[in-house]
Image (spheres, coloured by chain):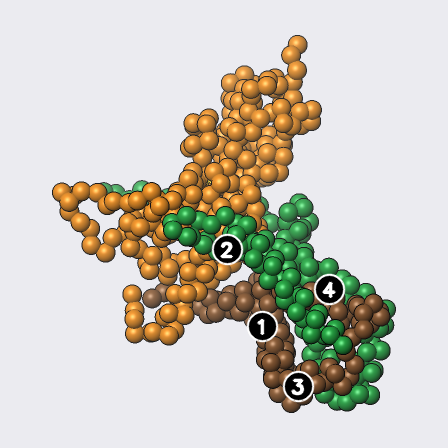
Chain colours: A brown, B orange, C green
Amino acid sequence: MGKRSNEPFLWMLFSVGGTIAALLLPVHVFLFGLAFPLGWLDGPGYEALLALARHPLTRVYLLVFCTLPLFHYAHRFRYTLYDGLQIKHLNELINTFCYGGAIVGTAFAVYLTWSI
Amino acid sequence: MAETITLEVQRYNPEKDTEPGLQTYEVPLKKEWVVLDALNYVKDKVDGSLSFRWSCRMGICGSCGMMVNGEPKLTCATFLTDYAPGTVRVEPLKHFPVLRDLVVDITDFLAKLSRAKPWLIRKQEKPLAEGEYLQTPEQLDAFKQFSMCINCLLCYAACPVYGLDPLFSGPAAIALAQRYNMDSRDQGAAQRLDILSHSDGIWGCTFVGECTEVCPKHVDPAGAIQQYKLTATTEWFKSMLMPWRGE
Amino acid sequence: MAIPTYYPPRAYRTRVSTYWWLRSWPYLRFILRELSSISVAWFVLVTLLQLGALHRGPAEYARFGEWLRSPLMIAGNAVALFFLLFHAITWFNLAPKAMAVRIRGKRVPPLFITVPNYIAWLAASLFVAFVLLRG
Ligand code: SF4
Ligand code: FES
């Protein structure tokens, strides 16, 4: 067996995360980022949203929503930095920044969806 | 006097020049002339020292790939009239070292190609007397598209990742590995996996997709690479879950 | 058989410019597609902050709502929406290339993969909207 990297694993996270991001993020940004703040639509109030977030299915949903897309971002942005700026030699720094960020975000997501 | 078109050709003489420069020629503009005809006109009538590769003039041999107005093209399939009026700039294929004028060094690609083992691998060869390995039309269809590659290297010239990272295996080599992996007569997928699946092989590809756009034979190397990533990922999980399985 | 000596020729090598992605529209479109990943991270972050505010009580949550209404956040989210739509569309359109699905030996046409993807996208979006808007 030659040099086996963990690249396949990271690529799979990238793919699954990318699919989730494509399916779900646009509607979230539209509603929470634009439609509710601008008053185009009436969003749920504090109590309703909290109740919703505490539903077990929503917890699972939010956990997936807030973790896998982060690994999609980490993988893609890492290569954008490599190729777009030609800084592959800063490999370790970039990896720490991208995947470190995704891991910190994941930790927060676990904590919040658990304790909310 | 018949109509003409201006040809700007990149010249480079390794014995004299420190870097390449453009030279301008006026060539007849004929409806049936391709860029390669114009280059041959220059070589025959104007300057015999102009160097470039070609052979078949019909999109089969894959040796006449050059940059035409900045895009990788088979010069035997690129008509002058598509650029008239205006100038036609002919440069050697991007991302390869230039040996002389329009001739590039493709040693790197050849090494990568042979590492991808583009031939049928059998665990056990069967004796010649037993006849050929049979295949159904459906089985042929599974890899036929990838077998159309003529090694013209337009895809390498279109691939920024190859330009940035010469270790990357590149589109055609991976598509050709996939051509044999998908062949029902082949049993060498595991051998190719090790070569292609370490980080320089396929993972450098970010799916820019331009290789597929420029390919004159509709090989779709970009698709081949993504499909190979899926295969490699599946194999990776198998080897994680069943480390004893081995090859 | 003697192995021929290889004399490396004196070749001219070019270097790819750092700004190669500005050189043509397909390359620029590619880099914009890749940059959509920033919008992905951005809105996951906003969602995490929102959950945090929700967790800390109504007063915090009201302040968070105020922040979302600031022009800067509106502009940021508008840009994010643009990039996320770009991501979704390119992602679904490229999916048939990455997956060679065969049924009875024949490769299924690209639309057979793209169309279900779009339907799933629509269904997921409507479902999320329904859950949040049902009143
Ligand atoms: S894949 Fe297409 S562009 Fe690349 S070498 Fe083969 S025929 Fe040429
Ligand atoms: S001369 Fe053979 S492919 Fe153009």
- Point out the frontmost of discs 3 and 4: 3
The numbered dot on residue A68 is 1
Q: Spatial distance from mark 2 to mark 3, Cα to Cα?
A: 37 Å
**In the rendered image, residues at marks 3 and 4 fall on the same chain:** no
Q: Residues within 10 Å of mark 4 (few under 14, many from 20)?
A: many
The answer to which image quadrant residue C80 occupies is: bottom right
Residues at circles 1 and 3 in contact by the CB criterion of under 8 Å: no
Look at mark 4 in the image and give the residue it sits on.
Answer: C80
* Amino acid on which the number 3 mark rests in the picture: Arg
Residue B190 falls left or right of residue C66? left
Look at mark 3 in the image and give the residue it sits on.
Answer: A54
Secondary structure beneath dot 2 equals helix
* Amino acid on which the number 2 mark rests in the picture: Ala
Residue B127 sits above or below residue C84 on the image: above
**In the rendered image, residues at marks 2 and 4 fall on the same chain:** yes
Residues at circles 2 and 3 in contact by the CB criterion of under 8 Å: no
* Amino acid on which the number 1 mark rests in the picture: Leu
Q: Spatial distance from mark 1 to mark 4, Cα to Cα?
A: 18 Å
Q: What x and y, as percent, mark residue B51?
A: 50, 29
Chain bearing mark 2: C
Residue C112 sits above or below residue C66 on the image: above
Quadrant for the C terminus of chain B in the image: bottom left
Viewer-side residue, C44 vs A9: C44
